[in-house]
Image (cartoon, rainbow, N blue to C red):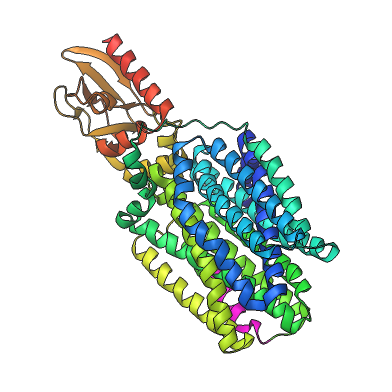
Amino acid sequence: MAKDSQWSAISRAAKHPQLRQIEAAYVAFNLAEQATWLAITVFAFRRGGVTEASLVALSQLIPATFVAPFAAFAGDRFSPNRALTVGYLTQAAAFAATAAFIAGDAPKAAYVAAAVAASAMTVTRPVMGSILPLVTHTPRDLIAANVVTNLTEQLGAFLGPLIAGLLIVAGSPTWVFAVSAGGLVLGALAVVRVSIERMEPEPMEASQVLREVLGGYRALRTEPVARWLIATTSVGVLSVGMLDIVTITFASTKLGGDRDAGFLQTAVGLGALIGTGVGTGLVGGARILRYLVGSTVLLAVPFVVLGLVGSRVWAVILFTVIGSGMSLIRFVGSVAMQRLAPFHVLTRIFGVLEALTMVCLALGAVIVARVISATSLAQGSAIVGIALGLAMVVCIVRLHRLGATGAPPPAELFDRIADDPLFASLPAPTVERLAAAARTRSAAPGEAIITEGELGDDYFLITSGDVQITMGADIIRTMSAGESFGEIALLRKCPRTATATATGDVGMYSIDSATFLHAVTGHPRSIAEAERITTRFLGET
């Protein structure tokens, strides 16, 4: 696909009315997340050095780990805009409290308030991960929407530390939390008006809640691709937790003060933007394997050589490269998850990832602090780089063996399915699963494709030739390329109501009953269209 068509898809996604509102709020969220994380780390580092900084990271992230599955479950049970609005308002209140406690010289209370904010943040990314498939319709548009979202995220990674650094230099960490609280109030106002169509969840007994909360974990037991995508993305997140401590340690020991940490984190954010730009190649349908391999190199090698440099110029270059590798890993992982994970528990799977994100951020901070303390910055960063590279290699090999590193289905197959009236309103991942299940079929002149009275197993989409539909001795109609048949027996769970016979050479795709029903019955407009087509056909006969 040409480069201009990639950017055309990205531009189209950026202009989507609902996506604009969602992304505006997400900008505020990401700026606040990056800025406040740096602010609380600097505040703790000034009080007790690397040990207190790592312990504060743990105190924020461990509670969030347990909250994340419940937050993701709320995203599945309630309207996405409501979940985001409540999440943003809770974060704003917690940030305001943190600012007040820091200003009042109450560090323990400030750490508790920051932990509440970190826990409230766990609702945002899982809901964002499940919203994008609902507002897009093709793999190209889904990836383009992810590009926009990732650019939004990396804009926060780039500007958040910069803003935090300026506010800390001009005032104190208190200012960072106060400004972030105001930004998230504006974010809540942006998403409260968003409405996204989806199936209403079934009523649930109180005894079922815990089981459903853990639905994402159960899905991972039976979905090895999703499991290894989670592992891959977690490696990228682990590196983020490590890099926070490495950044502050590098700035303090080699650049003469922790105030440079904000500007080094800005370099990481710049690299993340570059990584997202590299990821736009996926819009054209490229295989993800090359991107995973490339991101591994970009992440691991700079860590190995980081401790050997001492100038600001080289530090900025290496932190920029690390940022691009981390961004690319997480971008590819999210896109692949939306394409390949079970959609009905997608928010909860992203909730699992969010919980693991908290664990990996905390582990990363603790591990790298221990390694650097036991060795040195140079040796510790080299050990970290080698370990991250090896972990990525294991994940890539497993995903490749599972067939998850390929490109989306051929455009002509996807477009034929997406253009079908029954599937026209389905989100892109669902259409892609239909395309993956579709089989190429053909029929010779005079061949009966389905026979009246027999059991129905497949839905047929004609790509070439003509098919005559008869009931008994009566000719009902003739169908041609672009039309489909076979849905009545599947939807009504009854024998075939008519016979379909090829009048010449016919080319088709067929989709099995289980895949067809899972897709159509999972979306309100698809069900309505199926009922309309079925009623019209039965009324005509």
Up-down relation of residue 299 to residue 198 (above or below) = below
Which quarter of the rendered picture does the C terminus lie within? Answer: top left
Corner quadrant of residue 19: top right
Left or right relative to 468: residue 405: right
Which residue occupies the extreme right position in the image?
A: 170
Q: Identify the residue at horizontal 25%, vertical 20% (top origin).
A: 469
**Picture coordinates of residue 176 (x, y %)?**
75, 57
**Residue 62 in the image: above or below residue 509:** below
Tell which of 155 and 249 is nearer to you: 249
Q: Main secondary structure of the magenta part?
A: helix
Question: What range is drawn magenta here?
Answer: 295-308
- Return the x and y of residue 193 as percentages of the image width and height: 63, 31
Query: How many numbered marks, from 0 up?
Result: 0
Q: Nearer the viewer, residue 26 or 444?
A: 26
Q: Identify which residue is drawn at 81% across, 60% down.
A: 167
In this rendering, position of residue 515 left or right of residue 354: left
* Front-most of residues 43 and 12: 43
Q: Kindly tell me whether residue 287 is visible in this rendering.
A: no
> Toward the viewer: 291 or 314?
314
The single residue placed furthest to the left in the displayed view is 453
- Going 51% across and 62% down the picture, which residue do you hit? 62
Q: Is residue 477 visible?
A: yes
* Residue 184 falls left or right of residue 363: right
Asked whether residue 297 is drawn in magenta, I would say: yes
Relative image position of residue 426 (x, y in whole percent): 44, 34
Q: Is residue 419 magenta?
A: no
Q: Where is residue 290 in the image (x, y as percent from the top left)?
A: 50, 65
Q: In which quarter of the image is residue 155?
A: bottom right
